[in-house]
Image (cartoon, coloured by chain):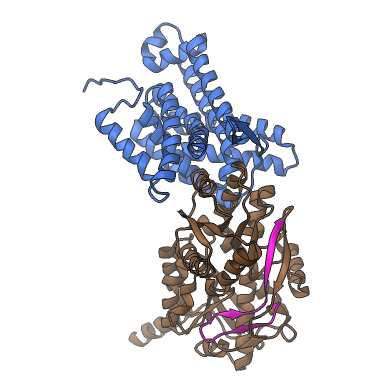
Chain colours: A brown, B blue
């Protein structure tokens, strides 16, 4: 009787401890599928699903089919932590997400403890400075992007003073701290330093302060929906300053939500589906065909996360979840050899990325690439 | 000075929308002792009605008209018949809890059947600037303020100057006596629900171009309007108007001159002060109840 019970227990344990079967690679995704980050998470998830579908159609990774599960963090760090813990119980090959830096901060240590690679969408500078050897970005960290933004404001726009508007979360605070230090180093005076709240609906007061500051330019660093709302309010109050930001300010969703009010906004973007890169244009077409909308950079991030796992695993030549992180460090993935990676990329020992980036402007409902900034270490 | 003028004007514009929503709280309270905790979601939902009709290919003006009519049916007639009437028999508390459940239900339904993401929403007015006393002023802000106040004043005139309006007031003051003197009380109560539905639909058309259409956008509005109704006076329409405008301006000034992080706390602090020192609200009427 005891033997039967033990056997039954072992079988049940095997069934419930892992949903991956032989010949399958289980990826667990935890993303912002609802709440304030729904745009981020939905694009990220769709990008992942497209990559999984394409890789599986081409024979999978080393002949293994990818299976992906999606869980909703509700854009909340505490829910993200619970969902990651739950996802790790099924012993995935790698963890994908979350997208919000605050959620990554609390979820990443769990993946590190489990010893699996965590490929995420967060951009806060501090994320890859904590020495977590299992954490990887899919886009630039703020320490890579903000110096370029600050240089653009100081050298190209020749602004002597700037109003900073940022969202009071890990993402916004990290960006504000980094760009503020860079701007001050370049001799640009900060004449207004305005924190706003995640999910904020009314920006009338904040825009009033920007107007009253007398700044030569405004640096706007908010999440997508809030970016759209402030662009509308800036237009409503007749603000004509140059508006500069990073990726989110001119994201596809922001342009869709803000409409003509987004025109003229400029941003440094690490990833854009408007990039003059043939592989990215082809990705955009496939994405639009499948989902019937143009993805923002988060769609690209989700897609690239799975492509990075493919490249790392093929480098190892075997399925080794514990060895994947080490395989990714220092890896240069060439778009010529793996077109799915879209642009040549080098992954540093800290999990940061080096690749081309773009300076864009929102013009008539589209991102227009004004300049291509090459990889730092070509 | 220009900055202060801008802040007050945009605060009044937002306040006019709060007032439209807050009036619904006072009307329902007066006629059926109902507190509708789904009032914020009642503002969010009409925008999605309009978007659904727009997506079907109708022009905006037609979508807006159908959206308002649909809101009157769903948020007025059906809300009263399906939620309020059956629950009110069991008392005010079960009804209040039912409206809380309705609030969650509406939000989750929109998220499930439309999208969890925000959607753009067309504006009734162009985003151009006017010059008033040498200051550039947004036509949208002026438009929202004028439109909101016009709706509120029309309602006030209707209640004060028409026979139906006076019958509604009589119903609100004492339904038993109103019934004795021949007023069709049930019809008056239904009319109140219809007026509330039309007001929230108008508020939705005015605020959604700025706040964007999203399943969660009613949370902020519902809370602000509830606070506005209490601050102004829960049992008076003019209280809701005053409360809405005051909260709109105070919120904007607090964000500009105190802190954006604590902007939500200032109206709440005001609410506590009002409850402690003037529980009937700024222009409300003190009520006594025999226990």
Tell me the residue at 51%/36% (across/down): B14
Q: Residue furthest top?
A: B181
Q: Position of residue A69 (x, y in %)?
A: 55, 71
| Magenta segment includes A49 | no
Question: In the depicted view, which residue is nearer to us: B105 or A106?
Answer: A106
Question: In the depicted view, which residue is nearer to us: A235 or B74?
Answer: A235
Which stretch appears magenta?
A342-362
Q: Position of residue B248 (x, y in %)?
A: 45, 35
Tell me the residue at 61%/42% (across/down): A236
Q: Is residue B112 above or below residue A342?
A: above
| Magenta segment includes A351 | yes
Which quarter of the figure is the C terminus of chain B placed in? top left
Question: In the depicted view, which residue is nearer to us: A42 or A261?
Answer: A261
Tell me the residue at 49%/22% (across/down): B192
Whether residue B57 is visible, yes or no, is: yes
Q: Is residue A324 above or below residue B56?
A: below
């Amino acid at each position: 009787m005891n033997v039967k019970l033990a056997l039954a227990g072992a079988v049940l344990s095997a069934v419930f401890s892992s949903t991956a079967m032989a010949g399958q690679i289980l990826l667990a995704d935890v993303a912002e599928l609802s709440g304030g980050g729904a745009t981020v998470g939905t694009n990220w998830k769709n990008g992942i699903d497209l990559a999984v579908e394409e890789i599986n159609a081409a024979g999978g990774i080393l002949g293994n089919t990818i299976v992906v599960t999606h869980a909703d963090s509700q854009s909340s760090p505490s829910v993200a932590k619970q969902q990651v813990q739950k996802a790790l119980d099924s012993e995935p090959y790698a963890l994908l997400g979350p997208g919000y830096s605050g959620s990554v901060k609390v979820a990443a240590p769990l993946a590190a403890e489990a010893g699996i690679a965590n490929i995420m969408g967060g951009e806060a500078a501090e994320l890859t400075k904590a020495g977590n050897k299992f954490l990887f970005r899919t886009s630039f960290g703020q320490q890579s992007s903000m110096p370029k933004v600050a240089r653009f404001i100081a050298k190209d726009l020749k602004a002597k003073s700037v109003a900073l508007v940022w969202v009071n979360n890990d993402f916004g605070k990290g960006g504000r701290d980094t760009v503020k230090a860079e701007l001050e180093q370049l001799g640009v005076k900060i004449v207004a330093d305005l924190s706003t709240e995640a999910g904020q609906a009314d920006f009338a007061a904040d825009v009033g302060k920007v107007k009253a500051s007398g700044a030569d330019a405004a640096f706007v660093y908010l999440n997508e929906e809030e970016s759209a709302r402030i662009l509308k309010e800036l237009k409503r109050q007749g603000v004509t300053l140059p508006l500069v930001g990073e990726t989110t300010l001119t994201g596809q969703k922001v342009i869709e939500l803000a409409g003509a009010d987004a025109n003229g906004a400029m941003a440094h973007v690490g990833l854009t589906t408007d990039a003059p890169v043939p592989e990215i244009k082809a990705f955009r077409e496939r994405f639009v065909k499948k989902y019937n909308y143009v993805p923002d950079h988060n769609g690209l991030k989700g897609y690239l996360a799975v492509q990075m796992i493919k490249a790392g695993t093929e480098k190892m030549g075997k399925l080794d979840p514990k060895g994947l992180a080490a395989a990714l460090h220092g890896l240069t993935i060439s778009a010529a050899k793996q077109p799915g990676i879209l642009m040549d990329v080098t992954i540093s020992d800290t999990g940061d990325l080096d690749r081309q980036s773009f300076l864009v402007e929102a013009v008539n409902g589209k991102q227009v690439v004004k300049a291509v900034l090459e990889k730092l270490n070509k | 000075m220009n900055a202060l003028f801008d802040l007050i004007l945009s605060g009044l514009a937002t306040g006019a929308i709060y007032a439209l929503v807050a009036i619904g709280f006072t009307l329902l309270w007066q006629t059926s002792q109902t507190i509708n905790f789904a009032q914020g979601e009642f503002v969010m939902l009409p925008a999605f009605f309009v978007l659904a009709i727009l997506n079907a290919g109708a022009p905006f003006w037609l979508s807006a008209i159908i959206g308002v009519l649909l809101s009157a049916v769903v948020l007025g007639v059906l809300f009263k018949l399906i939620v309020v009437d059956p629950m009110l028999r069991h008392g005010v508390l079960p009804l209040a809890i039912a409206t809380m459940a309705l609030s969650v239900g509406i939000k989750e339904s929109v998220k499930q059947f439309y999208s969890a993401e925000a959607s753009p929403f067309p504006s009734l007015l162009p985003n151009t600037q006017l010059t008033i006393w040498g200051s550039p002023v947004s036509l949208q802000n002026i438009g929202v303020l004028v439109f909101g106040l016009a709706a509120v004043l029309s309602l006030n005139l209707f209640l004060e100057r028409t026979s139906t309006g006076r019958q509604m007031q009589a119903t609100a003051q004492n339904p038993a006596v109103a019934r004795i003197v021949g007023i069709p009380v049930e019809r008056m109560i239904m009319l109140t629900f219809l007026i509330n539905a039309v007001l929230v639909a108008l508020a939705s058309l005015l605020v959604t171009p700025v706040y964007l259409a999203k399943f969660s956008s009613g949370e902020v509005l519902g809370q602000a309007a509830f606070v506005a109704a209490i601050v102004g006076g829960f049992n008076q329409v003019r209280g809701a108007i005053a409360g809405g405008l005051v909260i709109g301006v105070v919120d904007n000034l607090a964000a500009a001159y105190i802190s954006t992080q604590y902007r939500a706390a200032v109206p709440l602090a005001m609410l506590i002060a009002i409850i402690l020192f003037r529980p009937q609200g700024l222009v409300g009427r003190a009520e006594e109840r025999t226990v």
